[in-house]
Amino acid sequence: MAYYVNKQREKALSNQTKKNKMNTETIQTMTDLYDSVQEDMVMKMEDGIGDMAHGCDLHHFLCNQDYFIIGTYRAKQFIGSHAFEIIEKIKNYEQDNFGEVNTDLSQPENVANMFAYLVGEELLSECNTLQDCWDREMTEEEHKEILQELASVNVTSVYNHNN
């Protein structure tokens, strides 16, 4: 009888472990990935990155001066099941703009960071205040307005418009 009880207990623990793993594993959508890029950009702006820069340089300060993701494992986790869609986005962008693909698509870290760069462009294009100060230095007030606009961008709408 004790053997049977122990087997039942082991089975119950095994099922609970599987259930816990299923609850903690989340399937990310592409808009979740866009959300992550948006959150990163908002945090950087809140930290003062890009303030007092020319409007046209804001994207560079937010998406090109520091890595969005560091580490192959983290990049693979971020990309998840969207690898082919992300790679296609990068290839199309680079072929359209440079005539060739320069990003090493075999390196998940490079792919994730280039994806963040491209999404950053898409998100900032929704900020009207940025367009108004594109060719001059932003004021502190304009930086705050752009931050508010960026934080309120509907990423689902941006994703649907650009894909």
Image (spheres, rainbow, N blue to C red):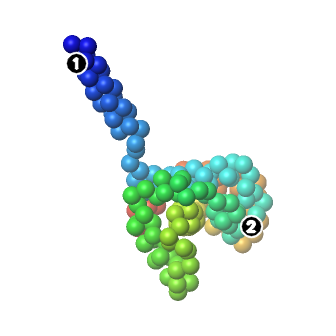
Measuring from the top left, give residue 152's x and y in whole percent.
54, 50
- Determine whether, in the image, residue 76 is placed left or right of residue 142: left
- Pointer 1 local density, CA inside 10 Å: few below 14, some 14–19, many at least 20: few
Residue 123 makes an appearance in the image: no
Question: Mark 2 against mark 1, which lies toward the viewer?
Answer: 1
Measuring from the top left, give residue 36's x and y in whole percent.
53, 52
Kind of residue at badge 2: His
Q: Quadrant of the image for the C terminus?
A: bottom left
The residue shown at (65%, 49%) is 43
Considering only order in the chain, which callout, 1 or 2, is on the residue closer to the N terminus?
1
The residue shown at (43%, 72%) is 88
The residue shown at (76%, 63%) is 53
Q: Which residue is mark 1?
A: 4
Residue 163 makes an appearance in the image: yes
Measuring from the top left, give residue 9's x and y in whole percent.
30, 21
Measuring from the top left, give residue 143's x and y in whole percent.
71, 55
Q: Is residue 156 above or below residue 2?
A: below
Q: Which residue is mark 2?
A: 54
Per the image, label 1 sits on a secondary structure element best described as helix
Q: Is residue 108 above or below residue 104?
A: above
The answer to which quarter of the image holds residue 52 is bottom right
State yes or no: discs 2 and 1 in contact (Cβ < 8 Å): no
Q: Quadrant of the image for the N terminus?
A: top left
